[in-house]
Amino acid sequence: MHNFAADLQAAQADLVLQRELLAVFRTPATLAPGDPGVPNPGLVTEIASVLLDEWHARYTIKKPLRFVVSDSKNVKNALACWTPTNDWVVVSLGLLWLLSENADRLSRDLLFVLSGPLNLQMTQRLRGDVSRSLAYTESLYAGAVAFFIGHEIAHLYDGHEGFRGHSLVPGKVVDPNLTHEYQALELGADYGGTRAAGRVAMKKFIDILEAPLVQGIEDQLLKRELLLIVSLGPLLAFTLFQPEALKQVLIDAGTHPDDRYRALWMVSNLMMFFDELKDQQDPDAAIEQISLALTIVLIQNAAANDALVQLFELAPRDGDMAVLRTSGIRRLLFSEEVTNHHRLLYATYGPLKDQLQRFARGPDAMPMQ
Ligand SMILES: [Zn+2]
């Protein structure tokens, strides 16, 4: 288990970090993830510990990787920061509360809508001490938190400090002529974040089952539910992503790519992630569940719960794709405009990655294709 008490002490002694915290979160105060003020402190501690231990076990360490929670409730943000003595990942209390509330809300709705047409085998397979509601809430929150921690770790891992100075602060444009370079680095970080979220949410979901998943027919439905929950967690990152935004022109400005583009990128990363799983027998089911997850998040953001219920009521058990097609969300996401932007950022990322190699903490983090 990672030593978060030592990180908290190191945070108070690291003056470069203190300055960054004040600039980004408007307070230098920090908490350990196990602090009672943190939503579900046990779960956040567990996720941060898993991801930090993974890092320390696998890579040549130049500096320790450390994690603290910023005591800012108003700023909903996360940050990677490198100082002369430490590598830092910081997530704010405000962001954790937002993710926790969204996971709760979504879990309640899922419990309601999944009791109908998608009534899966989950209830019978849960460990005796776990309710279905808790299973959803924990898996969703775990995936969302792991996405943000994984995203910031990926910035450090790939050596993005070589490009952007002290830290990676959303919106902090150092040079407006380098927009595509900034966005390309975010693409690399989202790749790391999505994979971390997938691993963590999947483990969380499987842990609460009383027996491992098997290849039987009855488990095929459970696997679909697993794919759906694992896809929903990282997509909770798009809390402000509105369906109307899909109809507008892609915004090509700022340090972070347009949400519509990031959502597409996350969807393709999830497909890659599920594809690599050995027991994933049905790639079509994966695509279906990822698309369904995206649709659910969009509907949730529009606060139209009736539409969410309708989505499930309209969908016969194997007909989700028909509903998704008529909703037009996939068509808009995979438009030529978004695909072209993807090509542009991907072409920017290659040479940039080579250039930053000497700052990287590990070997290739993202496969080039
Ligand atoms: Zn970032």
Image (cartoon, rainbow, N blue to C red):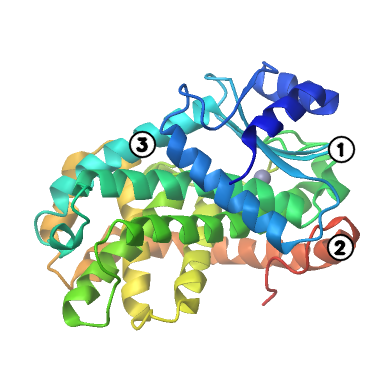
Pointers 2 and 3 in contact (C-beta within 8 Å): no
Ligand 1 placement by image quarter: top right
Q: Residue at x 67, y 77 (%)?
A: 369
Taking depth in this image into account, of 131 and 343 the one nearest to the observer is 131
In this rendering, the count of numbered labels is: 3
Left or right: 152, with 45 as reference point: right
* Camera-nearest label, 2 or 1: 1
**Which residue lies under the disc numbered 3?**
102
Q: Quadrant of residue 77?
A: top right
**Which residue lies under the disc numbered 1?**
85
- Counting from the top left corner in percent of width and height, residue 345 is at 70, 61
In this picture, is 22 found above or below 84?
above
In this picture, is 295 found above or below 322?
above
The verdict on label 2 being within 8 Å of ligand 1 is no
Which numbered disc flags the more N-terminal residue, 2 or 1?
1
* Amino acid type, mark 2: Gln
Q: Which mark is residue 52?
A: none
The verdict on label 3 being within 8 Å of ligand 1 is no
Q: Quadrant of residue 342?
A: bottom right
Residue 282 seen in the figure: yes
Left or right: 60, with 223 as reference point: right
**Which residue lies under the disc numbered 2?**
357
Q: From mark 3 to mark 1, how far is it between C-alphas?
A: 36 Å
In this picture, is 87 found above or below 157?
above
- Counting from the top left corner in percent of width and height, residue 319 is at 18, 71
Q: Residue at x 46, y 46 (%)?
A: 144
- Counting from the top left corner in percent of width and height, residue 204 is at 38, 55
SS at circle 3: helix
